[in-house]
Amino acid sequence: MTMQITTESIVDAEAGLVAAHERDLGAAQERLARDGVDTDAIIDEVSRFSVAAPSWAVGTGGTRFGRFPIGGEPRTTEEKIDDIAALNALTGANRTVSLHVPWDDPADPAALRKHAAAAGIAFDAMNSNTFQDNPATTGDGAVSYKFGSFANVDADVRKRALEHNRAVIELGVQLGATAITVWLADGTNHPGQANFRRQFERVADCLRELHEALPDDWEMYTEHKPYEPAFYSSVNSDWGSSLLLAQHAGPRAKCLVDLGHHLPNANIEQVVSRLAMTGRLGGFHFNDSKYGDDDLTVGSIDPYQFFLVVLELLDAGGGAMPPVRYMIDASHNLKDPLEDLIQATDQVQVTLAQALLVDRDDLADAQDANDPARAAEVLQAAYRSDVRPLVAEARRRNGAARAPLPTYRRLGYRAATVAARGDGSVATGL
Ligand code: LRH
Ligand code: MN
């Protein structure tokens, strides 16, 4: 059994932080109250918020150039859930896990569901995988996804890919999940390799067929990506393609925005605004990137862009985060995966608190007055405000840690997993 992190162990570990926290919190509440800010409303919205943890990112990820395991990595989906429960204990904001099949292929779904419930973790959107040939998804090698899955010219391959996605839904139903994310690697590497229109129509028809297989309370998400592993064209390459696919599939098909799936300098916050406007914004994969789909820690490269994305979400939600799916999708090559997920979640919480500070009426006035300088002042006043005491308080009120990363280290969770699982254990995933 993996070591458990509890509110009691956190309170003990953070005994020395209480006085400073209360001083900083008091100062922040006083400073913000002078500007008419309701800090309790912000603390409540932050403590209400949760972002799913990806099961495929609790191990060290790799690149084609190498992978450097950290030791103590989860060997089973149960152990992945133990690690996500430890993460949630520290952040109070990772209450669900997003599984990826067949990287997660539980022999006994009912037992897994029971294990997760005991750890206080529920199942978020499931992820299918037709971007790798795996006996579980190719009918023991009867087909290959080398030339695509839903886009494949071979009807047998498309049929297999549909069967795999239906199997992922069936597993999700047993686990209590109510959504599936479909990211397709389908595309081409060479000009002329495929007919763009016929490829797109094959994918669109398969997604419509999958939509018909959705249980009544389920949604499906199409996730766009401009390139990788296809390096000339991807079938679902951008938000427009994703929207067309979702609209063709059916009413419960929506678009998932992975922040790393945009070409350099794309205005992602405007993409969010567009999709929200159509009612087809289904969810997010939060991460950050400098060049391509780097899957780096949320807000670690361009925190202001992330702030503007969250601001668009509050605009779509009338001042609160709209009820779409929020997930982290990252890959950890150098850091302890749990430390990276702690920092990612903290960044989401801090950015949400900053965005909630924006005086949206003031901003609208400046916009209607064509006063860009004033608009910038409104945004910067919020972005430059130190909200960390409010976020720490939101976590404390959830029974979690004020300072999750130092507390994670103080509690020695990684050392305990290495002792329990060995320093050579490697998790399934990216
Ligand atoms: C593709 C992607 C997708 C997942 C995979 C792990 O780049 O973002 O969401 O299936 O990463
Ligand atoms: Mn993703």
Image (cartoon, rainbow, N blue to C red):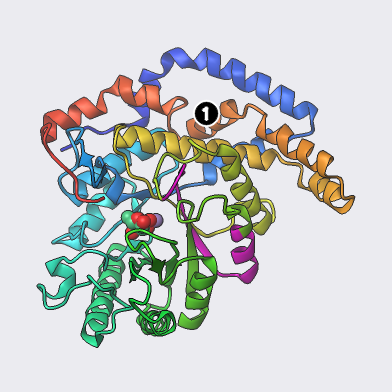
Q: Is residue 336 magenta?
A: no
Q: Residue at x 86, y 45 (%)?
A: 371
Does residue 293 show up?
Answer: yes
Residue 182 pos. (x, y %): 37, 68
Q: Secondary structure at mark 1?
A: helix
The crowding category of the residue bearing disc 1, from other C-alpha atoms within 10 Å (few below 14, some 14 to 19, many at least 20), is: many
Three-letter amino acid code of the residue under disc 1: Ala
Q: Residue at x 28, y 84 (%)?
A: 153
Q: Is residue 48 left or right of residue 334?
A: right
Q: Quadrant of residue 183?
A: bottom left
Please, is residue 173 above or below residue 345 in the view? Answer: below
- Residue lying at the far front of the rendered structure: 191
Q: Is residue 241 above or below residue 402?
A: below
Q: Which residue is mark 1?
A: 392
Q: Residue at x 17, y 33 (%)?
A: 71
**Can residue 178 be seen?**
no
Q: Nearer the viewer, residue 146 or 75?
A: 146
> Measured along the vertical axis of the image, is residue 414 above or below residue 305?
above
Callout count: 1
Task: State the image coordinates of residue 113 (x, y, percent, origin top left).
Answer: 25, 57
Of residue 360 and residue 186, the one placed in the foreground of this image is 186
Q: x and y percent of residue 424 in the render?
A: 11, 35
When asked about the image quadrant of residue 75, the answer is top left
The answer to whether 21 appears left or right of 414 in the picture is right
| Viewer-proximal residue among 238 and 60 | 238
Q: Quadrant of ligand 1?
A: bottom left
In magenta, the rendered stretch is 271-292
Q: Is residue 285 magenta?
A: yes
Q: Please state if 174 lies on the left or on the right of 141 as rendered.
A: right
Farthest residue, direction right: 369
Residue 52 rendering spot, x and y as whole percentages: 40, 50
